[in-house]
Image (spheres, coloured by chain):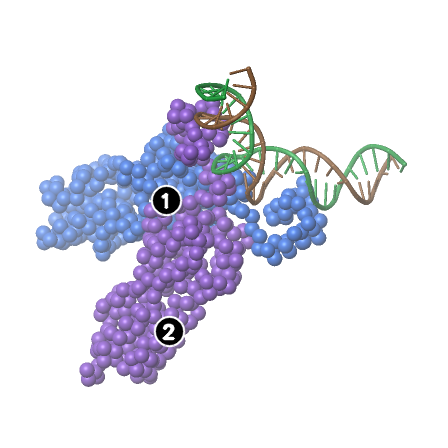
Chain colours: A blue, B purple, C green, D brown
DNA sequence: CGAAGCTGATAATGCGCATTAGTAGCGCGG
DNA sequence: CCGCGCTACTAATGCGCATTATCAGCTTCG
């Protein structure tokens, strides 16, 4: 329509004005006019095929992203991710098609589309080690939200810095007079759990107080252990304990302090203002995309830990028989 | 690696067993083995370029999808969309890159990527008419969530059926003894607003009662109009009115009934159990994707309205001076 | 006045796949 | 022993773009 070759259109479209390439102003204008009139837009697919870049960032989650179940937990990450993607002028591709394979989503499924994106962000409490190893081996650019142990090589991530957060929390707790603390939760499995547990162990050791590990949120166990403050890995467990305590006529935090370590991945009606700390979820999502774009441009394997913000809350008090 | 041509690999990969194509079992097995060993996956981009189909559905929203502001409102739609996309084995592409152009996102921006997806779902209270017209003109498959007026042709959509919902609600209200009702809100601009208003007008006419239209949620205006029941287009306005009424010493619903017409697009701390109806948001999202896949296969311009479910709530009562 | 230099554009190529049009190899009938 | 019909593959082509190499037309300079 403009009487020029496809090459010229491509040149004009991409606004190439290098010294290498020259386009007469009038020709350029003519092409632009036709583009405006027809509203032509280059097919992003072909574009991507040709220049191996499409400004699409993939987002892979092991759990469904939206479903109410874990929505409250994942939502903030996504807010950060979308925020940064918009700033970077990228679209987001949600890998929702990875049919649950054996009850669990896998990145590399039958007909994986990971490669469609320039790179991707991984979200989830745990991520399949084999998938991680393969991402690294195949040099697919990605950044994990949440620290990950090496998987056949260092994994790029943006995590929450749990150990210091748990330590500081423990200091606050011990400063209130508590001497026997408990950690409730698995303390392993996911890196985030292991990190919390590590912080707990380090803290009790450094502060010279007792540290008990209980896998299940059973109040009897807590009481039997003579513990006055409980660190719950999952806030949902905290809710369980608080309710059990109240039913038993105990008062929180007067008779038992409960500290939440940030996570709330299980759906639960919660109206308890837990003392503990806040995982900087939005910031993590945002930073993950930032690092991903950086990886795409310059490569590398960035690893960052973001600090958790202490939350005063109302479930921490001095132990009942405290003698300051 | 398998000693066969690219064509053969393609054939095996796509599991083509037509009568047209034949592959010796042993050859097929050999290729499959190599595929398993190397973990090869076909590049979805090239695939899309070659067969013009990539099982990616675009989602365009005029407001940011996740941000807390309107999150509570859009979230349910997305839940439904993701749900159905997963069932259909499609990935979702969120067009987040449509930089706010004049404060508002546009589908066809500088470098639009709409075409990357097989088709797309549109979300938002209002959608630019020109964008709609262009989608139709360019035959880009799409389905709008929310009814839309024609835009140079019929628009495919899944909407909420407001008129009957508002009428039924009005009947409940009138049955309680109310004779002077008010509609608070724009009543125009977006189709969803116009539809509510239409239902309101039809209802008051059919029921033979007074129907006042107030654009702003000002309690004085409501009282001045001698109205006993208010239909609020936006729940946020309902909150405003209820608070104003309470500050004035009035009781809701004893002194004033407030009916919410489903929408809550503005962020507001709400703990009022409004009487009114529920927009089937999740269902709309789900159905939109369903229709989109249908359009992709067979074409057409489906238009559907889903019923709103009545919500009993606690802001509807007989008017104070009711004489049944 | 011919060659070198520059300008402004184009033909050709490749990206990784699906698809179409063949084409070897082989058994079999005549 | 030639040709026909099958089977089981492969060569070639196109998708829509970015990129590279190339080229035609003009200036300018010696």
Mark 1 element type: loop
Mark 2 element type: helix
Q: Which mark is residue B89?
A: 1
B110 up-or-down from C1: above or below: below
B24 up-or-down from A2: above or below: above
Report the front residue among B122 and A306.
Answer: B122
Q: Tell me where residue B143 appears, x and y as whole percent.
A: 42, 56
Cα–Cα gap, marks 1 and 2:
39 Å
Task: Tell me where residue A224 sits by quadrant.
Answer: top left
Labels 1 and 2: the sequence-earlier one: 1
Q: Which residue is mark 2?
A: B198
Report the front residue among A59 and A2.
Answer: A2
Query: Is the residue under label 2 in contact with that under label 1 (CB below 8 Å)?
Result: no
Q: Tell me where residue A208 appears, x and y as whole percent.
A: 21, 37
Q: Residue at x 23, y 80 (%)?
A: B177
Marks 1/2 same chain = yes
Q: Tell me where residue B205 appears, x and y as whole percent.
A: 33, 80
Q: Residue at x 40, y 38 (%)?
A: A112
For residue B196, side relative to residue D14 (left or right): left
Q: Tell me where residue B231 appears, x and y as whole percent.
A: 31, 74
The chain carrying label 2 is B
The chain carrying label 1 is B
Task: Tell me where residue B268 sits by quadrant.
Answer: bottom left
């Amino acid at each position: 329509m403009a009487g020029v070759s496809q090459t010229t259109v491509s040149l004009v479209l991409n606004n190439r004005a290098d010294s290498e390439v020259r386009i007469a102003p009038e020709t350029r204008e003519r092409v632009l006019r036709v583009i405006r009139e027809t509203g032509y837009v280059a097919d992003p697919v072909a574009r991507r095929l040709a220049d191996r870049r499409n400004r699409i960032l993939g987002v892979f989650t092991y759990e469904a992203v939206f479903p109410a179940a874990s929505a409250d937990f994942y939502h903030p990450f996504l807010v950060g991710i979308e925020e940064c993607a918009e700033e970077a002028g990228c679209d987001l591709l949600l890998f929702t098609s990875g049919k649950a394979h054996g009850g669990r989503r896998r990145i590399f499924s039958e007909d994986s589309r990971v490669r469609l994106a320039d790179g991707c962000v991984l979200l989830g409490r745990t991520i399949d080690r084999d998938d991680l190893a393969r991402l690294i081996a195949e040099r697919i650019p990605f950044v994990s939200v949440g620290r990950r142990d090496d998987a056949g090589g260092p994994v790029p991530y943006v995590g929450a810095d749990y150990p210091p957060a748990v330590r500081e929390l423990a200091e606050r707790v011990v400063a209130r007079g508590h001497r026997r603390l408990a950690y409730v939760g698995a303390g392993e499995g996911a890196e985030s759990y292991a990190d919390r547990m590590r912080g707990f162990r380090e803290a009790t050791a450094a502060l010279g107080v007792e540290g008990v590990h209980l896998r299940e949120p059973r109040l009897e166990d807590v009481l039997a252990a003579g513990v006055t403050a409980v660190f719950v890995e999952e806030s949902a467990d905290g809710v369980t304990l608080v309710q059990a305590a109240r039913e038993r006529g105990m008062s929180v935090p007067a008779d038992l302090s409960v500290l939440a370590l940030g996570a709330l991945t299980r759906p639960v009606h919660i109206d308890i203002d837990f003392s503990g700390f806040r995982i900087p979820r939005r910031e993590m999502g945002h930073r993950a995309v930032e690092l991903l774009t950086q990886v795409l441009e310059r490569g590398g394997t960035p690893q960052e830990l973001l600090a958790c913000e202490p939350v005063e809350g109302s479930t921490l008090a001095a132990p009942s028989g405290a003698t300051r």
